[in-house]
């Protein structure tokens, strides 16, 4: 938990000096330790073992405020103890609650038809909440005569270009062929798209996305821009349409042609049943993309695109 608290403190302070300034902020209720810090935040019961994860850990409405900012935990009491500014507003627990979306774990029975937690059910929405905890903490540090705790210059640290691969192809399956033959451009044109090169499919625009990403990287710096492709992991629900197979030759070619080796790929879970999905660094350096998914509780499948073949290994 110390590492979590340290991370949140640095996150709230922000800027290049966050590491040094965070050492001047204490998170303790022990008066004997107050003199070690310029600002001390008194912990609320939130992180206690008997409270965390229970209904007692949820903030109570209406929220108390400190300096005009809604407070989830603690009180607005502040005081000097020697040269240390002691704050009873637990902005560490409050920030943790918001950053981790803690209430979504507690309110598991509140979901929309897609299994998502509705934004209108969230505490920030109900309380009209705006996260100002970082500004408060820097203000308290300056009040405790730490003048280097200046407001960081607003800037975009990194740009993530996200691409939903919902319909990667227009006419590459027999279903597509029948659709276009009956309701679309006719058999001749449909057959041409169905049997022709993948690059001539009308929906095959992803190389263009990669080109735009490269232009942006050249403009703002290669370390400040990344692409993230979201690929559907299957399912037969109406919300999973259009359906395509991860094992298909076209998707394999799409992965090799459009997605650079270092580009992150995420598998979007099916609307029909929840799946735990994330990307993982391939152990085999010859793999261009490594993905671990759990389609079933007791089965793990590794998907990796190699230069010549799509390799699937069940474990």
Image (tube, rainbow, N blue to C red):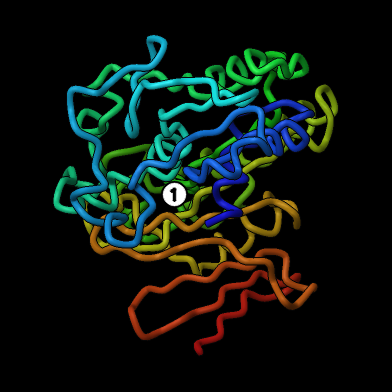
On the image, the x and y values in percent for residue 13 come to 64, 27
Q: Residue at x 26, y 30 (%)?
A: 123
Please state if 257 lies on the left or on the right of 81 as rendered: right
Q: Nearer the viewer, residue 128 or 191?
A: 128
Write down the quadrant of residue 256 in the picture: bottom right
Q: Nearer the viewer, residue 159 or 206?
A: 159
On the image, the x and y values in percent for residue 173 come to 41, 59
User: Is residue 168 at all visible to an observer of this figure?
Assistant: yes
Tag 1's secondary structure? loop
Furthest toward the top, the residue is: 68
On the image, the x and y values in percent for residue 139 come to 59, 14
Furthest toward the bottom, the residue is: 315
Residues packed near mark 1 inside 10 Å, few (<14), some (14 to 19) or many (20 plus):
many
On the image, the x and y values in percent for residue 100 come to 42, 45
Q: Nearer the viewer, residue 180 or 172?
A: 172
Q: How many marks?
A: 1
Write down the quadrant of residue 40 in the picture: top right
Please state if 41 lies on the left or on the right of 297 as rendered: right
Please state if 115 lies on the left or on the right of 142 as rendered: left
Q: Residue at x 14, y 52 (%)?
A: 109
Q: Residue at x 36, y 63 (%)?
A: 234
Q: Which residue is mark 1?
A: 171
Q: Residue at x 83, y 36 (%)?
A: 222
User: Is residue 154 at all visible to an observer of this figure?
Assistant: no
Q: Nearer the viewer, residue 236 or 182?
A: 236
Please state if 175 lies on the left or on the right of 62 as rendered: right
């Amino acid at each position: 938990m110390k590492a979590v608290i340290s991370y949140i403190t640095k996150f709230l302070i922000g800027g290049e000096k966050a590491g040094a300034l965070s050492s001047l902020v204490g998170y303790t209720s022990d008066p004997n330790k107050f003199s070690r810090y310029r600002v001390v935040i008194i912990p609320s019961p939130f992180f206690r073992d008997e409270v965390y994860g229970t209904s007692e850990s949820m903030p109570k409405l209406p929220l108390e405020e400190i300096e005009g900012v809604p407070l989830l935990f603690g009180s607005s009491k502040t005081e000097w103890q020697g040269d240390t500014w002691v704050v009873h507003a637990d902005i560490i627990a409050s920030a943790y609650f918001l950053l981790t979306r803690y209430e979504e774990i507690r309110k598991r029975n509140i979901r929309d038809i897609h299994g998502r937690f509705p934004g209108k059910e969230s505490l920030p929405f109900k309380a009209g909440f705006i996260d100002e905890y970082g500004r408060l903490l820097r203000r308290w540090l300056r009040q405790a005569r730490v003048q280097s705790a200046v407001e960081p210059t607003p800037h975009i640290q990194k740009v993530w270009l996200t691409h939903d691969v919902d319909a990667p192809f227009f006419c590459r399956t027999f279903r597509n062929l029948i659709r276009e033959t009956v309701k679309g451009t006719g058999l001749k044109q449909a057959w041409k798209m169905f049997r022709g090169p993948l690059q001539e499919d009308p929906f095959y625009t992803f190389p263009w996305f990669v080109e735009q990403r490269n232009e942006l990287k050249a403009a703002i710096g290669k370390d400040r821009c990344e692409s993230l492709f979201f690929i559907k992991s299957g399912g037969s629900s109406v919300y999973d349409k259009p359906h395509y197979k991860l094992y298909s030759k076209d998707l394999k070619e799409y992965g090799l042609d459009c997605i650079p080796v270092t580009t992150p790929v995420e598998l979007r879970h099916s609307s029909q049943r929840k799946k735990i999905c994330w990307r993982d660094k391939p152990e085999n350096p010859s793999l261009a993309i490594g993905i671990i998914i759990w389609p079933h509780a007791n089965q793990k499948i590794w998907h990796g695109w190699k230069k010549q073949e799509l390799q699937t290994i069940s474990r």
